[in-house]
Amino acid sequence: MTLVGLSAAAALGLVSGISIGCIGIGGVILVPIMVEFGIPIHTAIASAMAGYILTGLVGTGVFLKKGTLNWSSARWLLVGAMPAAILGSIAAKAAPSFLLELIVALLTGFTGFQSLVRASPKIDTRQSKFTLSNTARGGLGAFTGFLSALTGTGGPTVLVPLLLWLEVPVLVAIGLAQAIQLPIAVLATASNTVNGTLDLVLALELGIGLIIGAWIGARLAHSLNQQVLRSIVAIVLIGICALSLFRISRGFIG
């Protein structure tokens, strides 16, 4: 990649990292934007997943320090997520590019729509009771791990909307999503490396932006108005979805 391309990747990672750390749904912008700039979908997914290793480390550390990370719930989510992440990365390697792009676009749109229409919960640092059984938590983790590794969108994108639907306090939900992101990213990256789809240089540039952005975003999450932030990001996600679907349909027709 050129110097301009690498700088753009770092800037994209910065914006995504801030959103990931702050409201938990920023990772979904990485893959569709990289694809729009001509990066192959399989390479984009693998590089994004590698970058999430850094955001997972930073985000988990900040939320742990703030006392808003529920480890008792995170443990069972991780049990389900880790093996599923490997399966998801294998499926991503085998899946046709068109299908992956369509799944990513639809997930982007769903995440944006869900964030826009749902009333944002009050900022609450209480540890959620999270009444799901351990088996159900493991299943939720498995679903998150598989879909995250398959699409390269990051664990928070998948998990946060589900936890908010279960009425988990928003900061607790984001903290759990940060914790689950790390093992998913590590295992998926290991599998992607074996599969030969990882662009290490691109991943490092994304990672530089992501790690700085995640640190900023995680700290902002404890002080800014979440409803306003979620609305802004939701509109951006819906716009990205529309552009992605237009590009996919144009390629299909042409």
Image (tube, rainbow, N blue to C red):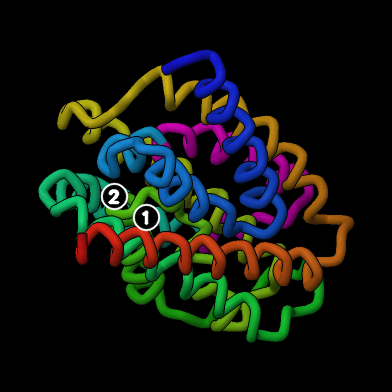
**Coordinates of residue 183 in the picture (x, y in percent):** 40, 42
Which residue is painted at 89% across and 56% down in the image? 223
What mark, if any, has residue 85 been given in the picture?
A: 2
> Where is residue 84, by image quadrant?
bottom left
- Residue bearing mark 1: 148
Tell which of 253 and 225 is nearer to you. Answer: 253
Q: Is residue 193 left or right of residue 106?
A: left
The quadrant in which the C terminus is found is bottom left
Q: Residue at x 28, y 38 (%)?
A: 40
Quick one: SS at disc 2?
helix
| Extreme residue in the top direction | 3
Residue 79 appears anywhere in the view = no
Residue 109 as seen in the image, left or right of residue 187: right
| Point 72% across, 37% down: residue | 215
Find the residue positioned furthest to the front.
254
Q: Quadrant of the N terminus?
A: top left
Point 82% across, 50% down: residue: 220
Of 158 and 38, nearer the camera is 38
User: Residue 98: image x %, image y %?
Assistant: 21, 57
Judge whether 204 appears above or below 186 on screen: above
Q: Is 41 displayed left or right of 15 in the figure?
A: left
Residue 22 covered by magenta stretch: no
Please tell me which of labels 1 and 2 falls first in the chain.
2
What segment is highlighted magenta in the picture?
48-73
Q: Nearer the viewer, residue 141 or 155?
A: 155
Kind of residue sitting beneath label 2? Ala
Residues at circles 1 and 2 in contact by the CB criterion of under 8 Å: yes
Q: Which mark is residue 229?
A: none
Report helix, strand or loop for mark 1: helix
- Spatial separation of the CA atoms under disc 1 and disc 2: 7 Å
Q: Is residue 35 above or below residue 24?
A: above
